[in-house]
Amino acid sequence: MRTAALLQLLRSILFTSCFFLSTMVYAVVILLCGWVLPFSFLWAIVRNWSVFNLWLLNILCNLSYVVEGSEHLPTGSHVSMWKHSSTWETIAQAAILPAQAWVLKRELLWIPLVGWALRLLQPIAINRSQGSTAVKQVINQGKDRLTTGRWVVIFPEGTRTAVGEQRKYGISGALLAIEAGVSIIPVAHTAGYFWPRRGWLKRPGVIKVVIGPPIQTTGRDAREITAEVQAWIDRTIARCMN
């Protein structure tokens, strides 16, 4: 038993090393191409990065995933709110949803190569300490991204939250959806149980991803919508683990 655990840890470390290396390589490709290629080509590179690393995670760590509810993905561009308990979902989003813009902390843009490549992908990079100013930025830039046909993906918790912990959801995603007149697509998953937010170990198994039915936002209160999203995600994760 101890030998198996040690082997899984070594496999996890190997995957993490390969993940960082592949991310750097893809970042260089985006930096070389980003000045001349349209966003659709850049997004194809990002999606390839996502699919490759999910495949590698399965090969090295025996950690795969299944998606339930793909039929709930509507046409057009919408806001998607995800549970944030792991690094896994930051990789998987590009493989599961159509072309998208991420709401992320601006400090990520300062990372050499990777951050520079991120900037070319036109994320919504916010200063989380600015409160209402950051919310306005999400709304204004989010509406712009949605008009270009991209989804906007938000982690309403703002940061990774360990399994079993609760954190209040922010309302910026709901406010954006209301102003843009689009739906919210909630996404729940069990990645935090297999790839915890701290530590090197990736446990073998199958991550369950559930895409919820579109939540309509027209004429509704942002806090009410956010509470509905959080309740659905919490309830769905509990069901997946039973």
Image: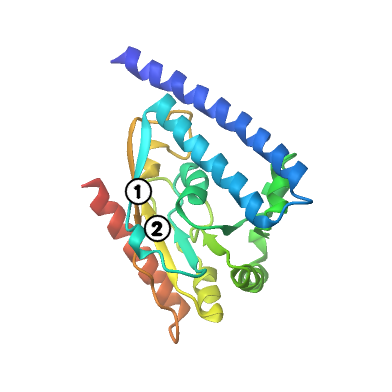
Looking at the image, which residue is at 53% across and 57% down?
158
> Of the residues shown, which amino acid type is indicated by label 1?
Gly
Observer-nearest residue: 6 or 45? 45
In this rendering, position of residue 154 left or right of residue 131: left
Between marks 1 and 2 in the image, the one whose residue lies nearer the viewer:
2
Q: Which image quadrant for residue 64?
A: top left
| Number of marks in picture | 2
Q: Residues within 10 Å of mark 2 (few under 14, many from 20)?
A: many
Residue 196 appears at what percent x and percent y? 43, 38
Residue 144 lies in what quarter of the image? bottom right
Question: Outermost residue, top direction?
Answer: 3
Badge 2 amino acid: Val
Q: Which residue is mark 1?
A: 164
Please say if 211 is above or below 11: below
Residue 9 visible: yes
Report which residue position mark 2 lands on.
187
